[in-house]
Image (cartoon, rainbow, N blue to C red):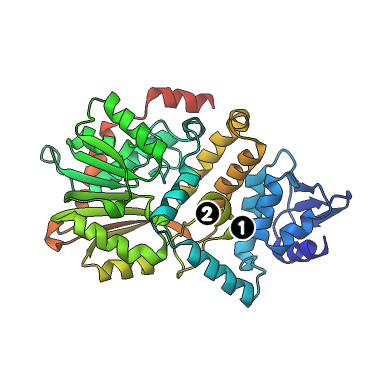
Amino acid sequence: MWLLDQMLKRLVRTGPLVVIDHDGREYTYGTGTAPLRIRLTDKGAAMHIARDPRVGAGEAYMDGRMVVEPPHDIRDFILLVMSNAKAAGGIDRKGPVRKLLGKLASRADQINERAKASKNVVHHYDLTRQFYELFLDEDRQYTMAYFRDPANTLERAQVDKKALIAAKLLLEPGKAEGTRVLDIGCGWGGLGLYLNRHFGCEVLGVSLAPDQVKFANERAQAAGVADKVKFQLIDYRDVTGQFDRITSVGMIEHVGAPHFTEYFAKTNDLLADDGVMLTHTIGRTSPPGTTDKFTRKYIFPGGYIPALSELVAAIEKTRWEIGDIEFLRYHYAYTLAEWYRRTCRHEAEITALYDARLFRMWQFYLAGAEQSFRHGNMVNFHIQTVKRRSALPMTRDYIQQEWARLSALDEAPEWHLARSAAE
């Protein structure tokens, strides 16, 4: 406990945080009211956390070696610790050698050749449909929602996200019938179906997640648009043809920094000369970094959150011009907080589908991701790219105007509004 005690003494100023060791001894850190209490259940738990706090705390919580006592939960603990860490300048205890080894391991993990890329996607996205249905909106949007008002429901915010993406694609109402759209990393098909419904676009969605592709095609069939909206289990690098618009929503995080130039070169080849591409991605506001070990090991193997400098450098090398960049700051924090809330409400169902360890892992993942957008250096980027600068209007006023029009067309389903009120 000595090493963890020393670390928490330096770190926690606002609390209080009370740690109860396995032998019942209590340690208090920081000042404040309504103490948050955690209990360590075995002799080695404190050392496991102190050796590598970011991974150790997650594993200790997953394995039941660290318990957060009611009325608080793991989200409260993570937000408390990381808000203190931000004020203290971080909690990384790694020396230069361990930092270098971690950087090399992260870089090697991002080499996503075709077979490895497919395996990495399946690791995360081929959890059961029932699992994702428990915490996502009905459209299964598993990326940042657009909270124009933090009080909005998740359903409203996800509708507004799709409207914002469509607006930035510059699809003209009444004139986009038959426009060919490539949706890279199409998820469960919601965006492709949205673009077809509102504009009559012909959409090809591609993904490496078999169940996502199967379900997306089922949705297109049920909507009677399977001849216009199609989904394929294929690597984007193997797509052929020409497209008028390309969307990439929450996909480039799985590409890996060594492949950014390859990614933008391929999409440039696929886009028509007067086309528009919109890349929606999580990004870091700091210089290039590494993917933390917990995320690489348990959540997104092969994943990497890019710095803007890395993306712009790849774009510049591959004949693109940037039409617009927008930083979306706290939207994902609100999205993740709602996913976390819904996950907790369905603890029994998730535990029955898998086990208590996966439920706690998912809690830790969502809460940790939320704090990265609240207290860390994570935001979202919208990067609009074109091959010809004349493809876009002189000003970006059209984005807000079209977003407002589209947003007014779609109301969140009444069923979800009723469910949100009940929850």
* Horizontal side, residue 394 vs residue 85: left or right: left
Q: Name the amino acid type tagged 2.
A: Arg
Q: Which residue is mark 1?
A: 83
Q: Name the amino acid type tagged 1.
A: Ser
Where is residue 178? Give x, y as percent.
13, 39
Q: Which residue is mark 2?
A: 374
Above-or-below relation of 422 to 242: above
* Horizontal side, residue 390 vs residue 416: left or right: left
Does any portion of residue 88 appear in the rendered image? yes
Secondary structure at badge 1 equals helix
Secondary structure at badge 2 equals helix
Where is residue 191? Give x, y as percent.
30, 39
Where is residue 279? Give x, y as percent.
31, 54
The answer to which quarter of the image holds residue 53 is bottom right
Question: Which image quadrant: the N terminus?
Answer: bottom right
Instruction: Give me the residue at 18% from left, 37% from top.
Output: 199
Q: Give yes or no for contact between labels 2 and 1 (Cβ–Cβ under 8 Å).
A: yes
Instruction: Give me the residue at 31% from left, 44% from top.
Output: 206
